Amino acid sequence: MIKNLVKKFTPSFLIDWYHFCLAFLGAVIYEFPSNKLKIIGVTGTNGKSTVVSLTAKILEEAGFKVAFISSIKFKIGEKEWFNNLKMTMPGRLKIQRFLKQAINQGCQYVVLEVTSEGIKQHRHKFINFDAAVFTNLTPEHIESHGSFEKYKKTKGRLFQSLKNSKKNQKFSIINLDDENSEYFLSFYADQKIGYTLGKSKTHNLKKIPSLIEANNIETLPEGIRFSVRGVSFDLKLLGRFNVYNSLAAISFALSQGIDLEICKRALEKFQEIPGRMEEVVKIPFKVFVDYAHTPDALQKAYQTVLDLKSRFSDSKIICVLGSCGGGRDKWKRPELGKTAEQFCDQIILTNEDPYEENPDLIINQIESGIKNKNKILKISDRKEAIKKALTLVKPKDTIIITGKGCEPWMCVAGGKKIPWDDRKIVQEGLKELSL
């Protein structure tokens, strides 16, 4: 509460200077560690954590020692641990210390998930990025940034930072199929690499001398299949959107001279990304847990489930849905409800991370986007909502629980964090119901 009051009454320029100075202090204390590493920053609205993990896996397969930070976990060489901060990008001192530790452990590459909130607070400052990766851009954190245009420009500051550095060759990796790609292509880089599923034939190849395209794309019950420059990839990751995530990682690998066969070996070893379309129950019905918390990400998750469901015409989709982040992005709540109604046969609206906001009010705002009220059950207690879904499911049906993925906390009023894991609650519910 005191922290919020300080923020409320302190002029914004002073807060901005505080964050900037703290970033500089962290770099000084730890002796500007990024100058001794190759740093890749991954930004966008969705897919960042997956791209970080896939990129690191390819680099490791190529024989490099790698560190990374994502919203899921931290890794330095052989050591990895879950990100329990409820914050994707750590604070400025922590992130500089992490880079220093990566050097001490002999790492050559560091892959960082870079968020707009992190950029806004200068957490990316005094980090010497060698490459910036753009995944996609859809409305998110609009109330925090003021508009979608400001949100986009904040993301662009990662790419702008490439110009200010003097070490090594600089690379930008851009999803050409995103309608905002031209903006991110406008920033300086020694080499610009664009990736596409073939939708971007109109792009000027003078701007993008290196084009990475996925061909022969198939979405299968057990994963995805596609080819790049004649090399076939057969991945266990679900959803067409993971073709884009894979292409982002492959594109960076190619910029480093890593062979496509190495990329293939690395990516085909992935079973799944924790909390990202993670299949926690396979038979006699399916249960997926996914982090999706924007309308676009939710639609892609539901579409993936719908593609799987199409094999069983009489099966149903049951979704457990909340709205991430009480006190922010209220605009998207009815949109999440509208998306759920489009794809789901039964919608269970529940609590997610209300912070200081009334959870029932959040649920009612999601409900306002749903016309068919007969589809809705409102159960504020998230644990009870998940258990209710398990009582409704029948063989061949699918439950999809969205919003938290593998997050280890639920944030509630009074600054409290309750230990949490949607996946464990599913397993507990199955035991209780003897399913």
Image: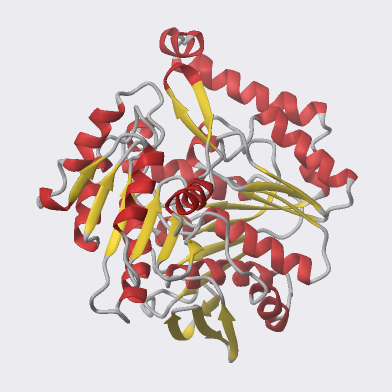
Does residue 434 appear to the left or right of 71 in the view shown?
left
Residue at horizontal 19%, vertical 48%?
376
When asked about the image quadrant of residue 191, the answer is bottom right
Image position of 118 with respect to 374: above or below: above
Does residue 147 appear to the left or right of 372 in the view shown?
right
Residue 3 in picture, x, y percent from top left: 51, 12
Figure disc tally: 0
Image position of 68 with respect to 358: above or below: below
Image position of 5 with respect to 259: above or below: above
Residue at horizontal 41%, vertical 33%?
353
Q: Nearer the viewer, residue 337 or 150?
A: 337
Residue 95 in picture, x, y percent from top left: 70, 36
Q: How is the image coloured?
A: secondary structure
Image position of 93 with respect to 234: above or below: above
Residue 76 in picture, x, y percent from top left: 79, 49
* Residue 207 seen from this side: no
